[in-house]
Image (spheres, rainbow, N blue to C red):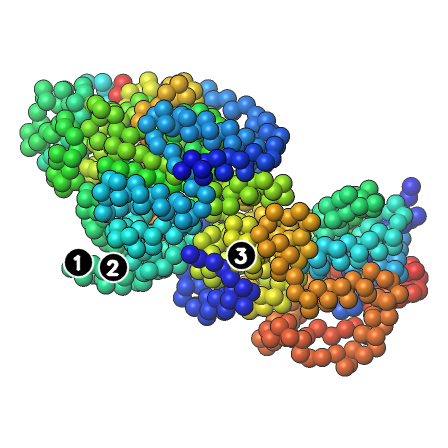
Amino acid sequence: MTKETHEIYVFGTCLIDLLRPEAGMAALRLLERAGFRPLFPQAQSCCGQPAFNSGYRHEARAVARAQLAAFARELPVVVPSASCAGMIRNHWPALFAGEPEEAQARALAARTFELCEFLDRAGLVLQDRGESVRVALHHSCSARRETRTTASAERLLEQLSGVECLAPAHAEECCGFGGTFAIKQDALSAAMADSKCDAVLATSAERLLSQDAGCLLHLQGRLAQRGDTLPVQHIAEFLWERIA
Amino acid sequence: MNEARDHILKRLRTVRREAPDTGAPSPATGADGETLIARFRAALEAVRGEVHRLRDGDWVGWLARELPARGVGNLLAGTGEIGHTLQAHPIPGVTLHRYDRPVEDWKDALFDHIDAGITGCRGAIAATGSLILWPGPEEPRLLSLVPPLHIVLLDAANLHADLATAIRSQGWAQGLPTNALLITGPSKTADIEQTLTWGIHGPRELVVLILG
Amino acid sequence: MNVPGSMTTLRARVREALGKAPVRRNFRAAMDGIRAKRAAALPDATDFAQRRARAAAIRARALARLPELLERLEQRLEANGIQVHWAEDATQANAIVLDLLHRAGARSVIKGKSMVSEETGLNDALGEAGVAVVESDLGEYIVQLAGEPPSHIVAPAIHKNRHEVAALFQAHHPQREATEDIEGLTAEARQVLRRRFAQADAGISGVNFLVAETGTLVLVENEGNGRLSTSAPPLHIAITGIEKVIERLDELPPLLDLLTRSATGQPITTYVNFISGPRRADELDGPREVHLVLLDNGRARIHADPLFADTLRCIRCGSCINHCPVYVQVGGHAYGSVYPGPIGALLEPQRLGLEAGGSLTSACTLCGACGDVCPVAIPLPGLINQLRAEGVEPRPDSPLPDAGRLRHRGEALLWRLWATIYAHPHRYRWLARLLTALRRLAPRRLGAWTRWREAPRPAARDLHRPGARSGVLR
């Protein structure tokens, strides 16, 4: 099979869908550039993670079940979010254990990929057309531990000749988003965001990137309230911007 | 509280679980005596242990030179061979005490007046720089613990690659003494600001004389 | 006894902790240091993975055979002359210890470090009975002087800097010359505690491992206070949880190695103490009596729960705590529990019940750092998440105390509403259209979110857009 005819699914994720569609568009374009034909099922919504991480398994399953139906064909599912990819890959099989959809969930988990991971494996070649810029890449915990895809993101950025990637102090530490944690333990979440923001600002980075929209939403909101002006961008958007 | 015992065991017996295989203990790494000694020395020196290599009979002479220089006036030994040898070769300026009566009879003196204790050992572990001590009637537990300086005589032939090897080759599973010990360096703490500080409750200094 | 309490009390404690900038700096510095040491001691991820698989298997095997191992242990210990006592809960354990002290006429106790005794509130119980207790681990001694519980299971006084310790020492040892120097403070503690070791009527210690095969209590420590507490006084009472037993002595080295490397980055501690009996007739020192108190306190219940039994694999190295991004912000006292950090969030709700302990599961972002470093491979984040589910949507036969009691009508309703929309494509599309169309009316205030962050604004167009640019989108 040639890449030209290679159809893949894109799972846009609920946060990107409503709050950062430009990141989703960039992901679609990058996948196209890599030679795939991305399909965006209109029936998709959310992986169910917010409810799952709050203990509401029943509700998480109901929402996840709807996605099983939306991504029924045996195609790879590419997700521009490590945390949603991790949810599908690592937690759906258990979420559906003993349910009629268990086998379906397992199969889908096995064909789900995080965007950078997928592009990196596909051997996407990136030709940098942008001016030189220093960026900090915030590795989400999902990219680091759930999907183990931080190296993929780094390799993609390394291809960009004008981009210098800086590592902030305590890069391995969580930014404090954590889904509903950001609300249930809001003060704690903000303190963690402050540590992360301070560490990023202490580098000379001109932009903050991440593979996860959740972390970005949280960090961007915190930076803005602190009066810091560091631009924040999903890695897909940044990559597309550099090569377009 | 036999009732508590029965209740607890009964609760534990409500489930039966598959016991996983734990795999074979890792085999000991083969290494010659000198390599083991070098490893032992490096590991122990990394935790501020002092290591000297001496010919068999030279340790008394070493003590005679070093103890007065280190301000040791009162040396404590057990009732075994080491104590006998020291009794036969008095060190000028150093008073030899023997740990020959129950601790209750002289606890305050032990805690307050002894500068150094000397013991043998059952061997040592190269990987971690640890000494193996089996205190007993001839060398009681506190002899290696209460005096601020602990001197240990180690036979060069008694080195083991690691703890697993030592446990196996010394047959620990067949019977342990009331107290067995691994000692790896002088007493230390990092409880204030994670700052490593030597000599908290146990000996401040540990000197190992490797013989042979 | 320390109980985390409700979400409201937990949040209040967290706010209080976040307000203490100097303490937070102490934690940050300490955790940075201890993480670096652990990383240097376990540098190879593949090697670590292999070693922890073995360690996890040893612990799992021991737990699978727990009742028979405990019986074998008891039999071996008694044959060695160590008397075994069983306690179902904290009250029983403290009563056993008090009774042993009374029978021996002991009025003063020197203590080695024991988290299980923190769990039972032993010091308070002894104090009320008129027994003088002195903690001898330097960190424990410091928090005892301060009248505080430990803020870390391995390094109890990690929240204090040298100046605070100096002030405490000056207040409690007025006859000694004041110093702020760490070596000076350490020397001072040595001098003060030395008399206590010599004079104590009894020593109380914890245990790191119990070996069934030989009937041995294994204690690891660096200071020598553990050895002194267990060999200088005429009576030694050890107290530990029933889960600490392993079958054979040859299973000890791999566990010991990972324990010390994970806890403090050491290949081994200064002292590893193997206690297999009281002083024999021909021996000149050592305690004349050795007792072991085996505490259940909810462990057997946890053991019976197939979902959470892995919790008991824990060897109390504290590595999960050291790598927790929440702990490093607020420290141990904010949790309000005996065991803080990830292991606390997992163990305490099971031990105390979800009503008293369940709020701890909210003090976790599920970042996974703890699970990565756990030397016995406890899937901490997954189990903490599972506990959240037990609070609001429990298994029908959940053995957890207060299962389901954290379900609040309002929150449950919100999630049901959420699922009603997100599980139905047309409803979700309708919501998306509504939000994008009314984006300019989006509220600038969104409760707790905007207390700290600006509100996100819905996009002008969502990603569900037919026929976008290249026509690839369906």
User: Label 2's element?
Assistant: helix
Image quarter in which the N terminus of chain A is found: top right
User: Label 1's element?
Assistant: loop
Q: Is residue C82 visible?
A: yes
Tag 3: residue type? Gly
- Whether A155 is drawn above or below B176: the answer is below
Left or right, C256 with reference to C98: right
Tag 2: residue type? Phe
Tag 2–tag 1 contact (CB < 8 Å): yes
**Position in image of residue C308 (x %, y %):** 60, 44
Tell me which numbered mark, 2 or 3, is placed earlier along the sequence: 2
Mark 2 crowd level (few <14, some 14–19, many ≥20, 10 Å Cα): many
Q: How far apart in space, not on screen, are marks 2 and 1 (Cα)?
A: 9 Å
Residue underneath mark 3: C357
Q: Which mark is residue C176?
A: 1
Residue underneath mark 2: C169
**Viewer-nearest of labels 3 and 1?**
3
The extreme left residue here reads B92
Mark 3 crowd level (few <14, some 14–19, many ≥20, 10 Å Cα): many
Left or right, C226 with reference to B100: right
**Count of number-bearing discs:** 3
Mark 1 crowd level (few <14, some 14–19, many ≥20, 10 Å Cα): few
**Tag 2 subunit:** C
**Position in image of residue A152 (x %, y %):** 70, 49
